[in-house]
Image (spheres, helix red, strand yellow):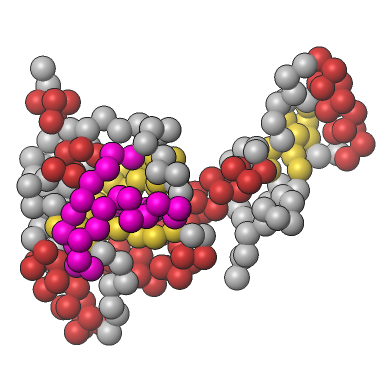
Amino acid sequence: MDYELLMNGNVKIGQMAPDFEATTTFGNVSLNDYKGKWLVLFSHPGDFTPVCTTEMIAFTRAHTYFKELNTELLGLSVDSNSSHLAWVYDIYCRTGIKISFPIIADRNGQIARKYGMISNDISNTETVRNIFIIDDKGIIRTILIYPMNVGRFIPEIIRIIQALQMADCMKSSTPANWMPNQPVIMPIPKTFEQLQERNDYIQENRNGINWYLSFEEPSEQCKINEE
């Protein structure tokens, strides 16, 4: 059997996020601490590394936008808590920026293995750049994986959360290149009568191409604060 498949978790979109308890730069945390909030759990290869440093700064600068979406940030690497603390202090001394979220010290790699954050083809110890977007019910909604030498684009992570929350609120889908408060895709009709009604609706409102693809504006209740 493939050792990596044996050791690494095989988490999937739609399943409950694996529970954990961990030591972090903010004290002890568990997944249950984030109940009722969305969570971006992300791993980085190592402390005192250039790409990771830029990401920590970028996530901190965007933290306010995540909070407005009822979303918290939680980093992770296999470095020690002392290493994390020394690193974030060095960032603060050199930039004046205080890293505003906890970083997990996963020294034995238990959480990283549980979530499949280690790719043995790349490294047997360091985590690659994984992102798990977990909703307020503890369900994994999105999984992103970046290579070690490519930094993450934070606005896209925010956009994904906005799209997920909009789709949930409107009980719909979002089209390609969707941006906040743009029209969403209406659910596909399930009966022939509904199909006919939808085609009439499209002809009247000119907001689609056929019964299987039509659009509607987000409701006021679902609209996202774009500030």
Looking at the image, which is closer to me, 70 or 112? 70
Q: How many marks?
A: 0
Q: Residue at x 10, y 58 (%)?
A: 79
Q: Residue at x 67, y 57 (%)?
A: 223
Please state if 31 lies on the left or on the right of 28 as rendered: right
Q: Residue at x 14, y 71 (%)?
A: 85
Looking at the image, which is closer to me, 52 or 222? 222
Q: Which residues are magenta?
A: 17-42
Looking at the image, which is closer to me, 189 or 210? 189
Q: Is residue 112 above or below residue 14?
A: below
Residue 218 in the image: state x and y as whole percent: 72, 50
Residue 41 in the image: state x and y as whole percent: 32, 51
Q: Quadrant of the N terminus?
A: top left
Res. 156 visible in picture: no
Please state if 10 lies on the left or on the right of 113 as rendered: right
Instruction: Examine the image and state in which quarter residue 18 appears.
Output: top left
Please state if 88 lies on the left or on the right of 146 as rendered: left
Instruction: Examine the image and state in which quarter residue 44 appears.
Output: bottom left
Residue 16 in the image: state x and y as whole percent: 37, 36
Q: Residue at x 69, y 31 (%)?
A: 187
Task: Please say whether residue 62 is one of the residues in the magenta stretch.
Answer: no
The residue most toward the top is 192
Q: Quadrant of the C terminus?
A: bottom right
Please state if 140 lies on the left or on the right of 1 as rendered: right
Residue 161 in the image: state x and y as whole percent: 49, 51
Instruction: Examine the image and state in which quarter residue 17 appears.
Output: top left
Task: Please say whether residue 37 is one of the residues in the magenta stretch.
Answer: yes
Q: Is residue 62 above or below residue 191?
A: below
